[in-house]
Amino acid sequence: MEKRLLIKYVGVDIYQQELLVLKNVQFEVHSGEFIYLLGKVGSGKSSLLKSLYHELPILSGVAGVLNYDLLAIKPGEVPYLRRKIGIVFQDFQLLTDRTVNDNLEFVLKATGWEDKQSIEEQIEAVLSQVGMSKKGYKMPHQLSGGEQQRIVIARALLNSPEIILADEPTGNLDPETGKELVELLYNIRLSGTTVIMATHNMSWISKFPGRILHCEDDKLVEVNNLF
């Protein structure tokens, strides 16, 4: 399968409010890659991820994501960019007052899905993909942390994204549950979806090999071998 260029940054400075967090960022990402984003707390990992879906604006350099020029993107185009990117947060961010199915239906309707049968079929498909097909009727508080994070991954898959961004997705989970989650994300990339995962946990890299990008001293560098 031919690898498509999904992300290209050249000479990009990333700011968090007035503070320069990463300077002269330069990297490319292609379809089907699994990429670790490493670095200490405050090193710019989350800021880099936020820049990719235009939560943090980019003011200089070349920044292309999924054929959108982030320096010239119009406000009306941002929702369409975000539909092509699935986001997995550390703290789940599920709506606690509704069932799993209703959480997923809410996202689909908010992103333009209207046909009831198509909505139901898509919810069924993503829950099956993350091994949660029997849990749609449950409320978030009835699920374990690992199960909630699986639902979050299902939510990220709803619009068949080309890229999944996972920001410390195992941060609140025990090691065994965390391993299952990383394995799930690792297998998702086999369908051609690119996964970029910010993490502190370097032990995943030996179990699930991938590219390594490291945020350190205001810079993003590619690391060929950590061990």
Image (spheres, helix red, strand yellow):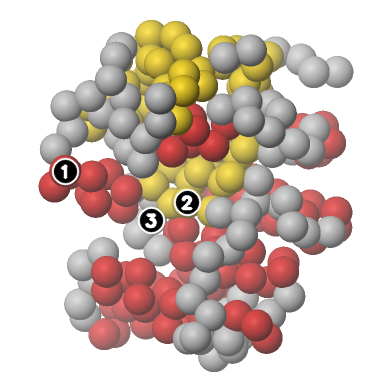
Measured Cα–Cα span from mark 2 to mark 3: 12 Å
For residue 223, what is the image quadrant?
top right
Measured Cα–Cα span from mark 2 to mark 1: 19 Å
Query: Which residue corresponds to the image point at 74% horizontal and 57% vertical from the top-left?
Result: 172
Q: Give coordinates of residue 34: x percent, y percent.
A: 59, 35
Name the quarter where the N terminus is drawn.
top left
For residue 153, what is the image quadrant?
bottom right
The residue carrying pointer 3 sits among few (fewer than 14), some (14 to 19) or many (20 or more) residues within 10 Å by Cα, namely some
Judging depth in this view, the residue of 199 and 6 nearest the camera is: 199
Above or below, 130 relative to 188: below
Left or right relative to 1: residue 183: right
Question: Which of label 3 and label 1 is nearer to you?
Answer: 1
Which residue is under mark 3? 160
Check disc 1 and give the amino acid type: Pro
Q: Earlier in the sequence, mark 2 or mark 3?
A: 2
Q: Earlier in the sequence, mark 2 or mark 1?
A: 1
Q: Earlier in the sequence, mark 3 or mark 1?
A: 1
Check disc 2 and give the amino acid type: Ile
Q: Give coordinates of residue 56: x percent, y percent.
A: 37, 35
Question: Which secondary structure, mark 1?
Answer: helix
